[in-house]
Amino acid sequence: MMFRLIIGSLLVMTSLLVSQTTLARQKALVVGIKDYNYWSRLQNSRNDAEDIAATLQNLGFETTLITRNDQGEVNNERFNQALQQFSQNLRPDDRVIFFYSGHGAAIPTDGGSTEGYLIASNTPAPSRGNKIAIQQNAIALKQIAETISNKIDPDVGSILFMIDACRNEVINRGADVVEESTPSQPLSKQIEVIYATSNGSTSLDKLPTDNQSRNGVFTRVAIEELNRHKNNQGYSSDAFFPAVKIKALQLAKAAGKTQVPAWMNDTGRESFVFVPCPTDQACNVVIDNSTTINHNSSADKQFWDEIKSSTDANDYRAYLKQFPNGSFVALAESRRDKYSQSTKQSSVLESLRLPDTKKAMSLEEMQKERENNPNGTSIYDSLQIKRNKSTTVLDSLRLPEKTAKDCQSVVFDLDTGTINGIKPTVSQDDVKAALPCFTGSTPDGDRLNGMLYNYGGGVFFNNHNFYFYTGSDFIEVRSDFTGTVSPSLLGVSKERLNGAYGRPTLTSNGSYFYMMSYGCLQFELRNNVVYEIRSYYQDCKAASEVR
């Protein structure tokens, strides 16, 4: 393949010769999981999947979309069933894209390395002792890779994975399971992988400066680039990834965040082609990169400045591909070789783990962190609990044991938006004092007495019957809530809900929102009955944007 790319303010033409004896089919499996039973809910994952699916269809891909719908949530059974059905219909010469938007996790193996998993809706929360349960309910990335690659002949077909995982900046660092922004590369030399973020940075579900966007940063930019080049025959990941990386970096940086997409292509073959050329014909690729360039400095230096602190060899490979005669070629080659050697010595995911020596925060420090960041979604972003934490530490966090029966006396009052009279803006100490079924809390999300654990700044009771966010200003109860909802509206029909509250202030994605004296009351319906209720201490427009 001959490929010459010049970035500047001008529109340039690049010749790309693609020779094909037959026009291969283009197939895509797209999965988006927004709603989780035990993990934090994501705002844009479903939108990401729907919009990527539509974009790929416009590019000629036959697309299978898996999100929560009339068939139910995307649990591990439905995920695996969709994967099997999709792979059974593949042919050896197909061009295949697998796209995932949702939570990802790294699970240590007995051999000391780690394996990447994609989190199904019914996967247990990442807490100490949950390793086996998570492995049984999550979907191993290696399994997905093997299932698809077994159907594709690497000499005539091609596979691209795009993984947009760990979306909400909440990172739980337990001893058994680590929620990570970048799962490991699948163990297959057939598969090219683009991750929404590289090691050590976060894939942003939304930007604090732009709450109106339907998509996360990576997916938004990916869709823009694919749409911009949908008519450019021969358009491939060689051109796609550098543009996506620069734009994602710029979007995140403008909002005071960091997100650095990563590209792994060890297939030894040409990069994945999104827009095929006509059979047995050469075609030209038109690439307009003028909108991505800061004209106050060279594109070469701008790209280098963005990656020069990276320890990911693929960042330097991307630089060398885009700037083969650039000012930093020698340094890029040196760092590529250095970090490639480092990667060979340890698994990709192993490098994602925080050092065991990172100090755990005290309860006082965590409370202080919450005070300094009242609008954050978590107080545990930088938390790492040492693996040898003693049971004495856990015991010191326990309150006098209370029984599961006590949870039945918890009352969620819709008229005041409170649980047992307390508001979601109070501290966890206030929660401990007011709720009878509270048995204690731990910094890293341990379950105590099978009744309570905290995760992501919230307090969860009885296997997620409800949770109470002290940092995000809302209470949620679900259909399995064992306490009392007053008035009793869990499980009622849409007609009865309308009779009780009248016309909603607004509706969004199957939810009804009503303005109350304290803020907003939300009812989420499934199969035309109330499944979930939330109260917010903010207006309904703002509440409708919280996920």
Image (tube, rainbow, N blue to C red):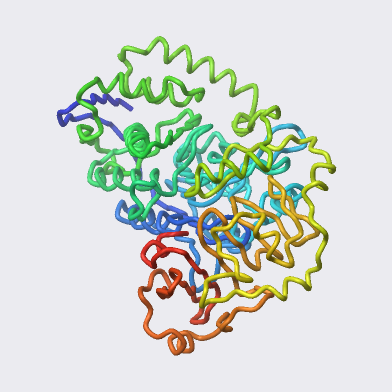
Residue 237 visible within the image: no
Q: Locate residue 477: give its quadrant.
A: bottom right
Please provide percent x and percent y for residue 82: 55, 61
Is 432 left or right of 511, judged from the image as shown? right
Q: Residue at x 43, y 73 (%)?
A: 517
Q: Nearer the viewer, residue 94 or 492?
A: 492
Is the N terminus in the top left, top right, bottom left or bottom right quadrant?
top left
Establish if 154 lies above or below 266. Answer: below
Please provide percent x and percent y for residue 379: 58, 45
Is 346 left or right of 543, judged from the image as shown? right
Q: Residue at x 28, y 31 (%)?
A: 17
Is 189 left or right of 128, judged from the image as shown? left
Q: Residue at x 37, y 83 (%)?
A: 503
Establish if 350 lies above or below 62. Answer: above
Numbered-mark total:
0
Q: Nearer the viewer, residue 427 or 49?
A: 427
Residue 4 visible within the image: yes
Establish if 42 lies above or below 165. Answer: below
Q: Nearer the viewer, residue 385 or 217?
A: 385
Q: Nearer the viewer, residue 91 or 224?
A: 224
User: Which residue extends farthest left?
Assistant: 10
Q: Residue at x 68, y 65 (%)?
A: 434
